[in-house]
Amino acid sequence: MSTFELRKTRDFGQIISDTFTYIRVHFRTLGKALFLFVFPIIIISGVLVSSSFLSVFDVADLNSTQPFDPSTNENMASFFIQFFIGMTLFMINFLLIYVIVFKHMQLVDEGIADIEIGMLLEDFARNFFGILGIIIITGIAAFIGALFLIIPGIYVAYKLSLAPVIFIVEEEPLGDALSKSWNTTQDFWWFTFGVSFVMGIITNFASYIFIIPMYILIGLVSFSTGGEDASEIGSIISVLYGLSIVVPALLYCIPITSQALVYFNIRERKTGQSMMDKIESLGDQNRTT
């Protein structure tokens, strides 16, 4: 049984380190779920986006002096269709990561030692579409706030940023999750923003370790094959571009995990519920002895 405790107070540094500790401790069950449900969709998304750019290279042969070909319109239509489907799957991937990570944390919080894949799919429709609704509502609210300058939009976004974890882990209704997130971040807005900002830097830096070599290869391929057919260049570049999408998407589980730890930390600081439960448990043990 894992000894990782979710509901406890943590300082800024502990949340950062415990994010990676949680992923390491539960890598077998959490990693397996992400590999089975998220990884295939990322691959398909990367392939479709790559193929869409390949269609562009087929159309825009930089060395071609041929007159307009009616098939150009078909290729451009293929680009938009594949790109749209690929990006839609890309967004579904993010929703799946939210659902899987937070459902996993809910099961850990309930003290379940052996988490099976099927357990992570319980209440899947509720969790998936609920998270989608929260993201849409948060996006609209942040957009309206941004109309009054950028800062109000950022403020609103982070005030509502804990709603997804509350919705799944605490099983609160959608409206209550948004309201509870707004109240929970009271006096902890900068803390919430700071953790997200730092985790974003860490995740982006980790992504760039993979992305930068990809773009270097893209540049080298474009330079070394400058005299060849654009479609040949496009085939190579499209594959590399697709790979540059896959890795950052998988790393998105890192900031999501830290988001949950921020919530547990704030709740413990405000209510001390976990400490009260421990004291009550000790009292019950003393009475039985």
Image (cartoon, rainbow, N blue to C red):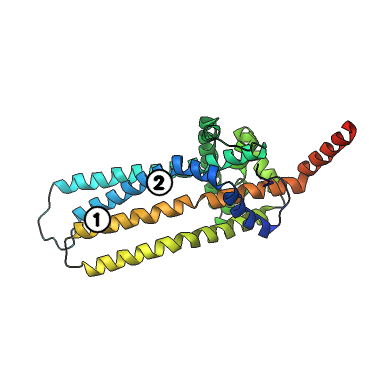
Amino acid type of the residue tagged 2 in the rendering:
Ile
Residue at image mark 2: 42
Q: Nearer the viewer, residue 100 or 144?
A: 100
Determine the residue positioned at 25% across, 44% down. 78
- Between residues 74 and 19, which one lies in front from this camera angle? 19
Residue 84 in which image quadrant? top left
Of label 2 and label 1, which has the lower sequence position? 2
Callout 1: 10 Å neighbours few (<14), some, many (20+)? some
Name the residue type under label 1: Ser
Does 108 sit above or below residue 146? above
**Image quadrant assignment for residue 176:** top right
Instruction: Tell me the residue that label 1 is attached to.
Output: 235
Q: Is residue 83 left or right of residue 225?
A: right
Q: Secondary structure at mark 1?
A: helix
> Residue 6: image x %, image y %?
68, 45
The percent position of residue 14, horizontal first and vertical second, equals: 67, 57
Contact check, label 2 and label 1, Cβ < 8 Å: no
Measured as percent of width and height from the top left, residue 190 is found at 66, 57
